[in-house]
Image: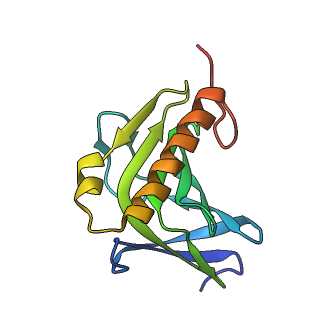
Amino acid sequence: MSTPNAVTVIKNDHTGKEVWRYEGQIIERGSDYIILEALFNRDDRNDGYVVWRRGDRFVETFYTNRWYNVFEVHDVADDHIKGWYCNMARPAEIEGNIVQSDDLALDLFVHPDGRTALLDDEEFAALPISDAERGHVWDAVDKLIVQAKEGKPPFQIVKA
């Protein structure tokens, strides 16, 4: 039985085909965004730039007017912020308690100290998408990198 704040997130590939589905809880909702909380439900793994652990808490923001979504990643053990995982994606579709997002392969990870790591750029380059979509994605990446370097929301940069 789901709660009134339950939301289903559907991650699609660039063609709109579903590749992953999971549940979360709505924290906040606006006219062009939704913020939800979800727990990482996959096995632990080290991707080099971060170690993902089952039960890590994600505070996820999806936008209907931006070419990305942002996941603030908190460690399962003590809830410290590990960083922000930014998915480059078509603007999300938010209808009722369903959020759908077409992932466009390119990702940006922002560390708590403001360092950034661009991920999966070769996979992104191989996608059969329009030049206009590529432009939207690169504009989003540029914007997020500037925000991260300046410690502007959604990034809360910790100075060493």
Position of residue 127 relative to residue 22, above or below, is above
Based on the displayed image, in which of its 4 quarters is residue 143 positioned? top right
Q: Residue at x 40, y 58 (%)?
A: 134
The picture places residue 31, in percent across and down from the top left corner, at 77, 72
**Which residue in the rendered view is the most extreme toward the front?**
131
Q: Quadrant of the C terminus?
A: top right
* Residue 75 visible to an observer of this rendering: no
Residue at 71 percent across and 69 percent down: it is 32
Whether residue 38 is visible to the viewer of this picture, yes or no, is: yes
Find residue 93 and report its image quarter. bottom right
- The image shows residue 96, relative to residue 59, as above or below, that is below
Q: Is residue 34 left or right of residue 109?
A: right
At a point 63% along the width and 76% down the height, the residue shown is 6
Residue 56 % position (x, y): 49, 49
Q: Position of residue 3 (x, y in %)?
A: 67, 80
Q: Residue at x 52, y 37 (%)?
A: 83
Q: How many numbered discs? A: 0
- Locate residue 127: give its quadrant: bottom left
Quarter containing the N terminus:
bottom right
Q: How is the image coloured?
A: rainbow
| Image coords of residue 140 (percent x, y) | 53, 50
User: Viewed as shown, does residue 28 lie left or right of 125?
Assistant: right
Q: Is residue 40 left or right of residue 19?
A: right
In this view, the residue in front, 94 or 7, is 94
Vertically, is 145 above or below 45?
above
